[in-house]
Amino acid sequence: MSTQQSKRNEPHAHSYRLRRMRNQSLKPPIGKVGGEAGVPSNFSLDVGWGRLLFGQTFESAEEIAKTLRAETPGERDIAFYIRDPHVALAAAPQQLFLDPSHTYRLDLATYRPAHKPVEGVIIRRLCTQADAEAVNRIYIARGMAPVAPEFFWKRRDSRVMTFFVAEDEATGEIVGTVTGVDHARAFGDPEHGASLWCLAVDSQQARSGTGTALVRRLADLFQARGCAYLDLSVLHDNASAIGLYEKLGFRRISVFALKKKNPINEKLFIGELPEEKLNPYARIIVDEARRRGVNVEILDGEGGFFRLSHGGRQIACREALSELTTAVAMSICDDKVVTRRFVEKAGLRVPEQADAEDQDAWKKILEKSGSVVVKPARGEQGRGIAVGVKNELEIKRAILRAREVCDRVLVEELVEGHDMRLVVIDFEVVAVAMRKPATVVGDGKSTVAHLIELQSRRRRDATGGESQIPMDDETRRCVAEKGYGFDSILAEGVKLEVRRTANLHTGGTIHDVTDFTHPDLIDAAQKAARAIDIPVVGIDFMVKDPSKPDYAFIEANERPGLANHEPQPTAERFMDLLFPLTVAYS
């Protein structure tokens, strides 16, 4: 054939190849291919957190059920591309369940790569041990099963599995990850398919568009390899993820997955409480109770009230506040002045404090410390608190705002440092976290107000609506204190702290430091709990370094949000306190 003829034929050959790929990609690979030339039978792939069982390679539905039942404890196997899920379930109805996830497919023959990358984010392959550890941190924060770092490390150059990470260009931190599997390289798939697994983004650090960038990078890779399609599995009610995938061109197909009933999968098969919406702080306790076989009666879902019963014992709760907390202990925590007196008598270090009515007293505190905290004597979730107020006029304005929450207002010495929350259950510290104020990162084109709106939306999505940054006078004051306004354009990579308080409800973020906390801080928190005589409490300290003994007591919260401290076992310890004879999954 001449060169001229070859060139004339190339477009037709290319069009035929694209049509063939597209036709293949529109067909779910649910037919049996195991036993074909080069295709192994009953193929499963170890992916670190468990095995992927490719259903189209299995001899029978019964064989799929048998393999799933042999799952290693602590792992999570997934049988994908199941042709007859009802038959496999019938083989082990007490041990298996149909995964409530949809399968979505991207046709790589028609997919078009993005021309514009996400600013400030680098998508690259996982290449170091530190990358692997960062991926696990994100997995754990998102409630996913962690993977041994050595697993990633040994497969960093694998052609079967590909691990991409998203790196924040400004900080160097890993803020997202995704895993891809090449089916042809894994088991000689005649369909030339590929699949996406474990897309996870750090909701507290990542820039907007990070998840999209990870998916696109994986799609680009598999398209370049000549794969026909890219499949993924997503929970049926994960509306935000489904919206992202559909925007990228993924379309739903009729492919099913099976899993084994185990503690990791429990939320998928235990079922939801009917017609009751609970906030994350009540939900984490209710889920742990149901997991242990403790009966749950929802008294008022919106308010977080429920009753637990097991055997002859019944206990009513409002989130982490139970009948075991006395009215006396609750009243001590409710009044910050009273709380301060109790813990000071127990030997804890407390900041200097004055009633807002006593101007001479708080003026002396201002003169001595240079800046103060103004807060209502009663209140929660950071409402009415102003931190770092430096002049008398601003103090008076902050006092007026605080009086909207409580008639009595306190002016307190500002102790420099970071906000620490220690959760004490049954007079033992079970979790410690540093709480950081709401912060936005500039992109060189967005206003501060727009950046706050974007960050607030991410925090709201990540916490079930519990966390958002209020666009109020306090936020405006904190922004102005740094020399900016809501209409200012924040330069690329510049970080701006838009609140001084670190409360979750005002957009703050939480970072676990349980393993690095100094013993003196642990001891002080336990002393505070005993001084108040309260079985469950969140003790707030101001510290410069969690690994050092210096601190100042700030307040005690009789209803700490246990959901804020995962992966620490706060709900488990709470249930141990309420029902010590119940046994959780081993």
Image (cartoon, rainbow, N blue to C red):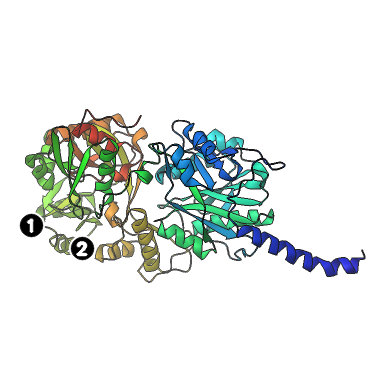
- Farthest residue in the right direction? 2
Q: Residues within 10 Å of mark 2 (few under 14, many from 20)?
A: some
Would you identify the image quadrant in which residue 358 lies? bottom left
Which residue corresponds to mark 1? 357
Query: Depth check: 139 or 132 in front?
Result: 139
Q: Earlier in the sequence, mark 2 or mark 1?
A: 1
Query: Depth check: 323 or 483 in front?
Result: 323
Quadrant (top left/top right/bottom left/bottom right) for the C terminus: top left
Which residue corresponds to mark 2? 394
Q: Is residue 547 above or below residue 172?
A: above
Can residue 68 be seen?
yes
Would you identify the image quadrant in which residue 217 lies? bottom right
Please give the label number shown on residue 100.
none
Q: Amino acid at mark 2?
A: Glu
**Residue 226: image location, x then y, percent:** 69, 55
Element under disc 2: helix
Which residue occupies 40% across, 44% down?
143
- Farthest residue in the bottom direction? 487
Which residue occupies 17% across, 63% down?
401
Query: Depth check: 172 or 49 in front?
Result: 49
Q: Amino acid at mark 1?
A: Glu
Which residue occupies 21% across, 29% down?
580
Can residue 547 be seen?
no
From the viewer's perspective, is 122 left or right of 396? Answer: right
